[in-house]
Image (cartoon, rainbow, N blue to C red):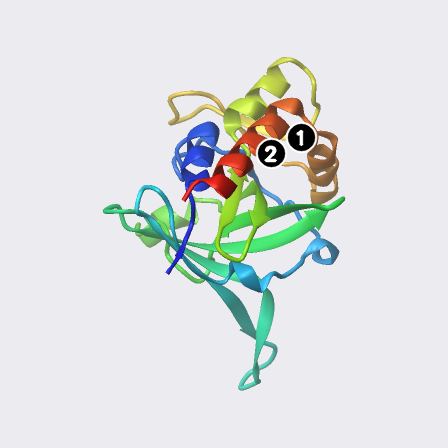
Amino acid sequence: MKTLKKALVLIVIFSGILMTGCLVISIHPFFKTEDVIYDADMVGNWMDGDSSIWTIQRNTYIESFMGEEKDANDYNMVYYEDGNGKSVLRGTLFQLKGVQYIDFYPDPDYDNHSTSGMTAYHMIPTHTLARVHINSDSILLYWYGEDWLDDLLEQNRVKIAHETIHEGLPTNRPVLTASTDELQKFILKYANDPRIVDEIEEIFARGCTDD
């Protein structure tokens, strides 16, 4: 099994606890079709420092009924959280101005909620975003955290379409509603934000040196 080095644990700590509502979320995808790339080094079984397992496979599709199965340019990513079940995500690797990112989205063909049909009708899947550095034996991820976005909004440093959700949550939560075009302008504008770049460089350095 390939080992996902300690970087993932550090990234989860910086960006909030994974899958619990502390990530930047968007109604629309962060990528366009022409931005999508594929890297075979993503495929495999990976373990993080919490003994959680990521199984990453290339997605496939069939263009027509009884047609031939073809390779897609995105990934089926199954996250087995140690002792707490699993989540099935669709991961799309893409690149903007030489920087690689992954757009994560719940797999529409899998019931990630394990709830009743009526409850599921009231849930809207959203996209999350991570920067990524891929090696043959490690994947280093940096998820964009909600606290970072909150700071930008509170300081009026960014004007991007969003809604603030209050009901049923312990704190207010921003949900990005901007188009993909506007999302990409936002990503590019803050690609070199020192708060992000400094953390990423530290994380990548630790991930590349720790075993």
Within the image, what quadrant is residue 27 found in? Answer: top right
From what the image shows, is residue 92 above or below residue 122?
Answer: below
Q: 10 Å neighbourhood of mark 1: few (<14), some, or many (≥20)?
A: few
The residue lying toward the viewer, choosing from 114 and 52, is 52
Q: Which mark is residue 85?
A: none
Residue 182 screen position, x and y as percent: 73, 37
Q: Is residue 1 visible?
A: yes
From what the image shows, is residue 156 above or below residue 122?
Answer: above
Cβ atoms under marks 1 and 2 closer than 8 Å: yes
Q: Quadrant of the C terminus?
A: top left
Q: Quadrant of the N terminus?
A: bottom left
**Helix, strand or loop status at disc 1:** loop
Residue 100 screen position, x and y as percent: 65, 47
Residue 192 screen position, x and y as percent: 70, 29
Q: CA distance from mark 1 to mark 2?
A: 6 Å
From what the image shows, is residue 100 above or below residue 73?
Answer: above
Q: Amino acid at mark 1?
A: Ala
Q: 10 Å neighbourhood of mark 2: few (<14), some, or many (≥20)?
A: many
The residue lying toward the viewer, choosing from 153 and 195, is 195
Q: Amino acid at mark 2?
A: Leu
Name the residue located 75 percent from the left edge and 36 percent from the top edge: 185
Comes first in the chain, label 1 or label 2: 1
Name the residue located 37 percent from the left edge and 56 percent from the top edge: 111
Residue where numbered disc 1 is placed: 161
Name the residue located 69 percent from the left edge and 28 percent from the top edge: 160
Horizontal arrangement in the rendering, residue 141 relative to residue 158 (left or right): left
Residue where numbered disc 2 is placed: 176
